[in-house]
Amino acid sequence: MLTHIASLDKSLTLNQGVVPTDRSASTKGKSGSYFETVTNSILAACQHLSEVASHRLIFFDSNAFFYDSLYVGDVANARLNNALTILKHNIKLMTAILTERAQPLLIKEIMKACYEAFLLVLLAGGTSRMFNESDHVSIQEDFNSLKQEFYSCGEELIAESVVDKEGEVVEGVIGLMGTNTEELLEILNSLSSENGVNGGKLPLPMPPTTRKWNRTDPNTILR
């Protein structure tokens, strides 16, 4: 649709008589296109569809291999390998059925959904998962392998800098998992004091769950 709109817009521009003179100025948008509103709507729809498709792929179609099984029981026997095999197959399949113009947007959204699922496993994975301080080494290896899957898609689909930038929150959480309990408590107490929560005199209140995970979020540190 975008390709046809660009062609039609060019035709209207070259043939000024098609659109009445008194309507030309009001019809065109800020970009000089007669179809600015339509184009923006299509781009917004593409974004929404990519988000829906990526979340369905990761949290529904691949759920049994990813969120439901990753690190269940213990880290050593429930690594990311199987999920990566499925992910690689699905990315290859989806890029084969999409036009080239649609592929970069969907790949980025799939990556973001993978990162979101990975964080949920680490921070809200339920009682079937327990982590030791030493597990962070294996978890970091798995996350590096996950990023490598998106590196291998190629710069034309997603830049390595984007893969790294989007993964910074996960890297920060993995770093917290390798921090000993005493240090985590000191960080949590320090953040609470800085925010004027208790002045260090009263028991720390339960930090609210915001789902905006990061290594300086009290709820993330507590988890």
Image (cartoon, rainbow, N blue to C red):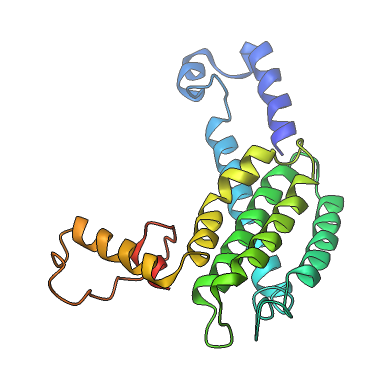
The residue shown at (23%, 63%) is 192
Place of residue 120 in the rendered image (x, y in percent of width and height, measured from the top left): 54, 70
Compared to residue 124, the image places residue 10 above or below, namely above
Q: Position of residue 52 (x, y in %)?
A: 62, 61
**On-image quarter of the C terminus:** bottom left
Q: Which quarter of the figure is the N terminus placed in?
A: top right
The reply, left or right, for residue 128 in relation to residue 56 is left
Front-most of residues 37 and 81: 81
- Residue 91 location, quadrant: bottom right
> Based on the displayed image, in which of its 4 quarters is residue 38 positioned?
top right
Residue 213 x/y as whole percent: 44, 61
Residue 131 picture location, percent across and down: 56, 77
Res 42 visible: no
Q: Residue at point 54% right, 78% down?
A: 125
Query: Does residue 167 sit above or below 25 in this rendering?
Result: below
Among the 4 quarters of the image, the one containing residue 198: bottom left
In the image, residue 131 above or below residue 149: below
Q: Is residue 117 left or right of residue 8?
A: left
Placement of 120 over or under 95, stated as above or below: below
Query: How many marks on residues?
Result: 0
Q: In front here: 19 or 46?
A: 46
Q: In the picture provided, is 21 more to the left or to the right than 18?
A: left
Q: Residue at x 71, y 19 (%)?
A: 11
Q: Is residue 30 shown to the viewer in this render? A: yes
Q: Residue at x 42, y 60 (%)?
A: 212
